[in-house]
Image: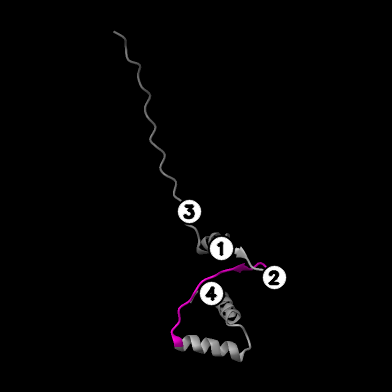
Amino acid sequence: MSARKPTPPRRAPEPPKKQRKLLPEEMARDAIAHEEPAPGPGDRVRLTFRIILNRKDAEALAALAIREEKNIGTLVTEILEGAAKKGPI
């Protein structure tokens, strides 16, 4: 009869590493990284989306664009850029 070799004690498994939670700014950078660059100077990207407004608000926005002699897309871009600079609502 052969003697059994003593087995070395097992090491405890390593605890799983906690994943670091990404900051909103890091998540936003990752989300925008794949967007199409916009033509023209500067580091701009083209975002394409639709918005749904009630008719009264849409007409008010169109009237503002007409008064300022701007394309409605340009006006909305300026509004969004201003809001982004102000920070969270």
Q: Which of marks 1 and 4 is nearer the N terminus?
A: 1
Q: Name the residue under label 4.
A: 87
What type is the residue that disc 4 sits on? Gly
Q: Mark 1 points at which residue?
A: 32
Q: Earlier in the sequence, mark 3 or mark 2?
A: 3
Identified at 66% across, 67% down, the residue is 43
- Distance from the alpha carbon under mark 3 to that under mark 1: 20 Å
- Distance from the alpha carbon under mark 2 to that under mark 4: 26 Å
Q: Residue furthest left?
A: 1
Q: Which of marks 2 and 4 is nearer the N terminus?
A: 2
Q: Is residue 33 left or right of residue 14?
A: right
Vertical arrangement, residue 63 with respect to residue 52, above or below: below
Q: Is residue 89 left or right of residue 85?
A: left
Q: Residue furthest right?
A: 41
> How packed is label 3: few (under 14 Cα within 10 Å), some, or many (20 or more)?
few
Residue 22 percent location from the top left of the image: 49, 58
What type is the residue that disc 1 sits on? Ile
Q: Mark 2 points at which residue?
A: 40
Q: Earlier in the sequence, mark 2 or mark 1?
A: 1
Q: Mark 3 points at which residue?
A: 20
Identified at 44% across, 46% down, the residue is 17
Indicate which label's residue lies in the foreground, 3 or 2: 2
- Distance from the alpha carbon under mark 1 to that under mark 4: 18 Å
What secondary structure is the magenta-colored segment mainly? Answer: loop
Could you tell me which secondary element the residue under label 2 belongs to?
Answer: loop
* Residue range (magenta): 42-55
- Circle 2/circle 1 CB separation < 8 Å: no
